[in-house]
Image: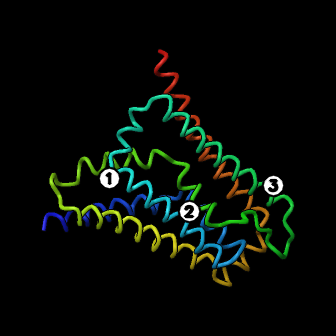
Amino acid sequence: MILLSTLLQLSVIHILMAMIPGPNTVVVSYCSATVSRRAGLVAVAGVSSATFLWVLLSLLGAGAILAQAGDAFRILRLAGAAYLVYAGIRMLMSGGSRSNTVPRQVYRSPFKAGFLTTLSNPKSAVFWTSVFALVLPAGAPVWFYAAVLALMTVQSALWYGGVALLLSTNLIRTWYARLGSSLDRVAGGFMVFFGLKIANDVRAEIAARMV
């Protein structure tokens, strides 16, 4: 009973985190609305695969190692920030050159876009390591850890899959096509914002350490 209650807690935490708009939502929405439903779902597969990886690393304790890695962890986060800024700039450029009737595909590989966008936030491993340290019962059986890993991955696929299905409907795609250039710029701006926010967090940490 305790194990099932713990799974429910983790499920709620994960869904609430996924519901907060972030880079994952932007990339899935963008691929779904500008390219196709298939592209959106492929991007979801990339997001879910990277989620699987981060949760697995967290269960293995890699998050604690990253948190103690100091400059190496900061460099990793800056690399992730650079990718988000790069992806955002490509969206901005696409918005500026887009045809009014045919959306231009920015990502040749939606899976890669979804995977790298999720992977670009190594703080996910630190976050889940902290959550697991507080919630997971000591001495839990192996099947329970496997269930946690499966739950996080499946929920990620279901949530973002729902986003992809909604935003790839004919109504949404028609609406998006009419406002495409402006919405591309909005999506690109958000990606750049998320990247710069991560970079600024790293800068603040370095400044605080030097005080």
Coloration mode: rainbow
Mark linked to residue 59? 1
Disc 2 target residue? 25
Q: Residue at x 14, y 63 (%)?
A: 2
- Where is 105 relative to 187, above or below? below
Are there few (<14), some (14-19), or many (20+) residues within 10 Å of tag 2? Answer: many
Q: Residue at x 74, y 57 (%)?
A: 91
Q: Position of residue 140 (x, y in %)?
A: 17, 58
Are there few (<14), some (14-19), or many (20+) residues within 10 Å of tag 3? Answer: some
Badge 2 element: helix
Q: Position of residue 17 (x, y in %)?
A: 42, 58
- Residue 188's image quarter? bottom right
Q: Residue at x 35, y 68 (%)?
A: 150
Mark linked to residue 93? 3
Q: Amino acid at mark 1?
A: Leu
Q: CA distance from mark 3 to mark 1?
A: 39 Å
Q: Of discs 3 and 1, which sits in the foreground?
A: 1
- Work out whether mark 3 precedes mark 1 in sequence or the reverse, and give the earlier one: 1
